[in-house]
Image (cartoon, rainbow, N blue to C red):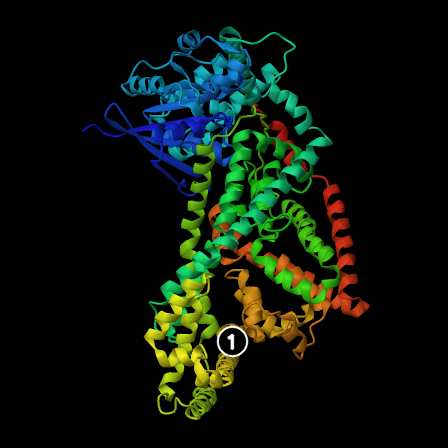
């Protein structure tokens, strides 16, 4: 059997590369990350003339320099993995620009097949391409394709077969004119270095003269200190610049552009001058200075309405499925006790609730990812980045920071996990790290329950404005933070020039949108699911252990025994005397809960009667008491309600006291000296500590600590608390939650996307300190000034808006300006 064939798929962004990849590989795909970096690696498999082909979809890149992770990954893969054939996908409607990458691939001496994709778009624009003439001049196979229609797939497969069989290599080279003598001399030096054997000589010579950092580092690594190539290159660069009046890298870029333009002029026939494409006409409005932002805002509102609101409704509709599954699985666990549940049951139920809390967001995530795929495939995403880039650049961000901030909840209702995941598309390392570090400050869905509780409790008369405040204040806090980071810790990080391509608009395909959405949801589930399980177990241990001592447990057991004894005495006063003992009390309560669960979603009376009949047959005695059948059952109804109320109260009190004496409870008390200036007591501290696992825990833990179950309002017990919770307390707590450090799953994602444990720890540390500082400023400052919560809210809002304006006016570092100026722009 022949060995597998390794093939690479390379191309510029928005050339339809992913569509061709899906066309060739179908469902046989695997997504991971390249080792040591955050760039996504997509691998697929297909059969070619009886031979298995492994196709690697390289990151979309305009060039093969070393300015971004995508460029480095694509170039390193071709150099180190040495694929037997590389498919270069180019947009047939913009061939002159896309040939720029083709020329670099030819220079790397990789066996190449050029796929002219989106030929249908070129035909609609009356663009004619001499495919055969282009193939003859370049010396490679050139195949017209239409990826979304699977057109040209057979010709592409035939070209791959021919290239894989070792056909003649292309002899085409870019003529660099006055640089050629320098290249010839440098190529001779490289050829004599045994340590550099196996590398494409002309390509390496060009890269060294371009002063490509990665190429220089490669030579130094392989040759060590003995080689004098770096010194010779430096002298050549200085001599060339002095002789020609232009630096080498700019001359190389211009030479490639001239070559690409010459090839296009010989083999591409454009329509008559004066015709304007539909995309260009549309962009007059979509990218307009005034209409563009309005259109963008409308699209974002629609995206929010569909994914968050409609997705939330769908999540609510399917929640009973998760709930029923949870109850069904709980049926395999040990039964509940009157006062305490067995450890296995408590842990199992806790873990299941933690997992279903995350799974409940899947409809929202699916719709989000599907809509994002539509924006990407339609060609609008680059327009969005173009519109916002100028404003975001003032704060050290990037036009492509837009999507992560939207996913994080730039208004209300996102999630920090996919937000941090989406930063992988930002080519500027400085802006990418800044976006990673502020994305958790957005309003994720998990924060909203706590916001709603506090707003309804303390700002009910102005709930709409209070929600507007918390929904928008996060952006006015995040932008100054981003600017501060870019001026300090991120100052030395490399920046890439903002290369903006406006691809033609396309009509997305249903298959493409669904496959992208499912793929991203699966990545999310796979990476987070195990983390949630592990965190749930840890939080369960911290919030339940070491538990109460024997003396306190004896008090609760005594109260439980009395409640059960009182109920048995009530039974003995009826005609059921002698048929019911203390051992029947807990089974009776479990019987009542099981009956309630069985009838929870039942609306049909006949079905309800059948359930009653089945339970009555199972235990006539328990059914009589629970359903108040006959005179004896009706007489026991008050006693049963009293028993159930006593059990609920005792379990609640036990849970509260267990929390107070747990590891998290003791930690909450230990933090009181630090947090009291922010208005937080130990109970609030426990809720905030539990939220580190998942922010949904903050509202649930507050309810548990303050002795509340279900959906009862928390505010009543909070107001009854001795600390006297006020609107100023509530405002400080809301702002701390807005700036709360990333939860554990998000922290893991920060670690993955930044490829640094240090940045993960910093994100936790700085947001904790910032949140505590802001909460202290608002609470202590508001208290000293005698401000109400409502007054402090809008004074703080005005301060944040003013700070954002001032920070936006601070000029960017000169080093960044120089770096952007010297980098060749290829599009």
Disc 1 crowd, CA 10 A, few/some/many (<14, 14-19, 20+): many
Q: Is residue 677 above or below residue 391?
A: below
The residue where tag 1 is placed is 659
The quarter of the image holding the N terminus is top left
Q: Position of residue 240 (x, y in %)?
A: 55, 18
Tell me which corner region of the image, top left, top right, bottom left or bottom right, holds residue 81.
top left
Q: Is residue 283 above or below residue 800?
A: above
Q: Position of residue 254 (x, y in %)?
A: 56, 17
The quarter of the image holding the C terminus is top right
Residue nearest the observer in this picture, 83 or 144: 144
Residue nearest the observer in this picture, 444 or 703: 703
Judge from the rendering whether residue 173 lies leftward or rightward of residue 305; answer left or right. Answer: left
Residue nearest the observer in this picture, 142 or 216: 142
Q: Position of residue 157 (x, y in %)?
A: 33, 21
Judge from the rendering whether residue 431 lies leftward or rightward of residue 795; answer left or right. Answer: left
Q: Is residue 475 above or below residue 398?
A: below
Q: Is residue 260 above or below residue 661?
A: above
Residue 344 visible to an observer of this rendering: no
Please identify the residue farthest to the left as the structure is shown.
1
| Total labels drawn | 1
Describe the element under mark 1 as helix, strand or loop: helix
Residue 24 visible to an observer of this rendering: yes
Q: Position of residue 133 (x, y in %)?
A: 43, 7
Which residue is drawn at the image coordinates 36% and 63% (left, top)?
Answer: 329
């Amino acid at each position: 059997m022949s060995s597998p064939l390794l093939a690479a798929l390379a191309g510029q962004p928005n050339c339809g590369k992913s569509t061709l990849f899906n066309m060739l590989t179908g469902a046989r795909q695997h997504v991971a990350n390249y080792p040591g970096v955050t760039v996504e690696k997509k691998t697929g498999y297909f059969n070619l003339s009886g031979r298995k082909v492994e196709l690697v979809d390289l990151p979309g890149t305009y060039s093969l320099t070393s300015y971004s992770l995508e460029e480095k990954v694509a170039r390193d893969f071709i150099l180190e993995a040495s694929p037997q054939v590389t498919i270069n996908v180019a947009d047939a409607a913009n061939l002159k620009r896309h040939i720029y990458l083709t020329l670099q691939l030819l220079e790397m001496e990789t066996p190449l097949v050029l796929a002219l994709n989106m030929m249908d778009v070129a035909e609609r624009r009356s663009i004619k391409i001499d495919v055969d003439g282009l193939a003859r001049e370049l010396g490679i196979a050139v195949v017209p394709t239409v990826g979304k229609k699977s057109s040209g797939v057979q010709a592409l497969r035939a070209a791959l077969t021919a290239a894989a069989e070792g056909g003649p290599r292309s002899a085409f080279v870019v003529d660099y004119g006055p640089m050629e003598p320098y290249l010839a001399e440098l190529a001779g030096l490289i050829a004599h270095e045994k340590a550099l054997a196996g590398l494409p000589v002309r390509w390496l010579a060009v890269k060294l003269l371009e002063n490509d950092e990665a190429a220089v580092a490669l030579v130094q690594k392989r040759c060590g200190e003995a080689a004098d190539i770096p010194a010779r290159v430096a002298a050549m660069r200085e001599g060339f610049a002095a002789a020609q009046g232009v630096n080498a890298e700019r001359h190389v870029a211009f030479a490639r552009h001239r070559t690409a333009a010459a090839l296009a002029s010989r083999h591409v026939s454009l329509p008559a001058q004066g015709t304007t494409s539909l995309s260009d006409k549309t962009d007059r409005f979509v990218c307009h200075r005034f209409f563009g932002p309005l259109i963008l805002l409308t699209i974002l509102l629609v995206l929010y309405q569909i994914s968050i609101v409609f997705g939330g409704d769908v999540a609510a509709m399917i929640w009973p499925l998760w709930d029923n599954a949870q109850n069904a699985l709980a049926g395999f666990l040990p039964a509940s006790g009157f006062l305490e549940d067995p450890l296995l049951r408590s842990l199992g139920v806790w873990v299941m609730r933690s997992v279903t809390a995350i799974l409940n967001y899947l409809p929202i995530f699916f719709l989000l990812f599907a809509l994002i795929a539509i924006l990407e495939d339609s060609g609008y995403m680059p327009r969005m980045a173009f519109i916002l880039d100028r404003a975001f650049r003032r704060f050290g961000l990037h036009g492509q920071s837009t999507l992560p901030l939207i996913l994080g909840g730039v208004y209300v209702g996102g999630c920090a996990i996919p937000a941090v995941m989406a930063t992988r598309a930002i080519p500027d390392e400085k802006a990418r790290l800044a976006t990673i570090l502020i994305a958790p400050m957005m309003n994720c869905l998990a924060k909203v329950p706590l916001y709603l509780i506090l707003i309804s409790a303390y700002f009910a008369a102005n709930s709409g404005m209070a929600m507007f405040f918390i929904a928008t204040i996060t952006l006015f806090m995040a932008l100054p933070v981003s600017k501060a980071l870019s001026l300090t810790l991120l100052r030395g990080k490399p920046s890439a020039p903002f290369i903006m391509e406006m691809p033609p608009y396309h009509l997305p395909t249903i298959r493409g949108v669904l496959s992208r959405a499912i793929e991203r949801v699966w990545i999310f589930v796979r990476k987070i699911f195990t983390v949630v399980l592990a965190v749930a177990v840890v939080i369960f241990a911290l919030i339940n252990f070491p538990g109460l001592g024997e003396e306190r447990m004896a008090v609760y057991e005594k109260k439980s025994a009395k409640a059960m004894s009182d109920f048995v005495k009530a039974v003995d006063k009826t005609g059921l005397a002698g048929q019911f003992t203390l051992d029947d009390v807990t089974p009776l309560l479990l019987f009542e809960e099981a009956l309630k669960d069985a009838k929870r979603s039942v609306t049909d009376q006949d079905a309800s009667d059948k359930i009653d009949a089945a339970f009555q047959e199972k235990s006539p005695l328990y059914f009589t008491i629970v359903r108040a059948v006959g005179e004896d059952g009706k007489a026991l109804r008050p006693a049963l309600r009293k028993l159930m109320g006593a059990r609920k109260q005792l379990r609640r009190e036990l849970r509260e006291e267990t929390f107070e004496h747990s590891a998290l409870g003791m930690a909450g008390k230990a933090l009181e000296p630090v947090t009291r200036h922010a208005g937080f007591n130990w109970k609030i501290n426990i809720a905030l500590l539990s939220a580190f696992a998942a922010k949904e825990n903050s509202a649930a833990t507050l309810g548990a600590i303050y002795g509340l179950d279900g959906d009862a309002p928390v505010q009543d017990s909070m107001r009854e608390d001795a600390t006297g919770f006020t609107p100023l307390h509530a405002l400080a707590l809301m702002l701390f939650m807005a700036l709360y450090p990333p939860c554990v799953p998000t922290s893991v994602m920060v670690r993955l996307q930044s490829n640094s444990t240090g940045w993960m720890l910093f994100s936790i540390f700085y947001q904790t300190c910032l949140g505590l500082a802001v909460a202290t400023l608002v609470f202590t400052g508001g208290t000293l000034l005698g401000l109400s919560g409502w007054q402090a809210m809008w004074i703080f809002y005005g301060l944040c808006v003013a700070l954002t304006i001032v920070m936006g006016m601070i000029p960017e570092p000169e080093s960044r300006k120089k770096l952007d100026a010297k980098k060749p722009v290829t599009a």
